[in-house]
Image (cartoon, rainbow, N blue to C red):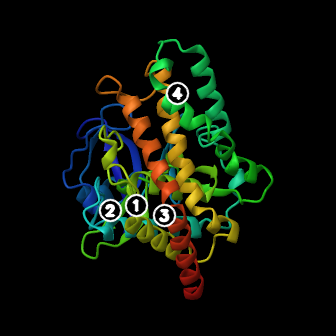
Amino acid sequence: MFTFIICFLAGLGAGLGTGFAGMSAAAVISPMLITFLGLPAYEAVGIALASDVLASAVSAYTYGKNYFRDGDRFYRMYQFITDSVSLDMVRTPRDFYESAVAFGNFQALLADYPAATLHETIPDFHNTVKRFSAFRSALEADICGRAAKVQPEIAFLTQREQELSLLVDLSGKQELPLRVTHNDTKLNNIMIDKETGRGICVIDLDTVMPGLSLYDFGDSIRFGANTAAEDETDLQKVSLDLNLYELYVKGYLTGCRGSLTEKELSLLPMGAKLMTMECGMRFLTDYLSGDTYFRIHRPNHNLDRCRTQFALAADMERKWQQMQDITEKAAAEAAAAV
């Protein structure tokens, strides 16, 4: 893919402003770009004129770097990916499978990267022990007087307190390897080829940090294999779609290409359950605290979200043996294919 330099001018015909590398011609259909990086109002020179402008001001640019620095501000450079789309919703099971392959490939490509050297973008993001402690504090404070209304949800969570610490404990004992994790595995964070429907690459890397592979896998199952919306009020509609679970496991392990340990493979179902429990716990904590973190669009919205997550986790428990069987079979098939 050819990389262009887009030259920004402080008004047409004025002096050279700021250059951004890494965008192909398809990225700039119009010669005018609206300011979106918090810089002064610049106007862009069209691609056709870029080379002429650069020819007279080569010294103003530093080539071969993947970032631009403007004082104490940094801008990361990307290549524009042509003939691709990002999807907000799964159109077919194939889309879900391709997202699994893409995130598995992300894990495989970074399997030997020293994850501990990465900055923890969101400290303790998936630390379920600390998440439970925050829930306890919110429950004890009960600043909105809502605890009496959610006793079933409180009981559901507290009965599983010991299980919630499993991954944190195993990580602390170094029984699970520290990995580079994406932490935002939504479908629209994958660029998909318009023609083939295959995943090209993973994008939106601002939440990349050290973590466990089970976090990314589990959260993908939480929202992708649920038969209902995240805030469904009719809990009879909430269940784990085992066909989608199987599809994702196969795709993920295909992408991982043997990079996961036996321990990680055996705990994939637990990753799905604990990420679902964690999300429900966060919704419940926020509900008890007065809805201060998650944006709500109706009364009891966070409570509805919590109940949906707990209903999904409960269904996973009912289907636990099936989840394990699917995972073991997929792991064996993936190992044979490597």
Q: Tell me how far mark 4 sits from mark 3, CA to CA.
A: 29 Å
Q: Is residue 301 left or right of residue 26?
A: right
Quadrant (top left/top right/bottom left/bottom right) for the N terminus: bottom left
Q: Position of residue 208 (x, y in %)?
A: 56, 50
Q: In the structure shown, which secondary structural element does the residue marked by tag 3 occupy?
A: helix
Sequence-first tag of 4 and 1: 1
Residue farthest toward the bottom in the current orientation of the protein = 336
Q: In the structure shown, which secondary structural element does the residue marked by tag 2 occupy?
A: loop
- Name above or below for residue 126 compared with residue 94: above
Of circles 1 and 3, the one toward us is 3
Which residue has dot 4 on it? 285
Q: Which mark is residue 103?
A: 3
Residue farthest toward the left in the current orientation of the protein = 30
Which residue has dot 1 on it? 79
Can residue 294 be seen at all in this image of the molecule?
A: yes
Sequence-first tag of 4 and 3: 3
Residue farthest toward the right in the current orientation of the protein = 173
Can residue 66 be seen at all in this image of the molecule?
A: no
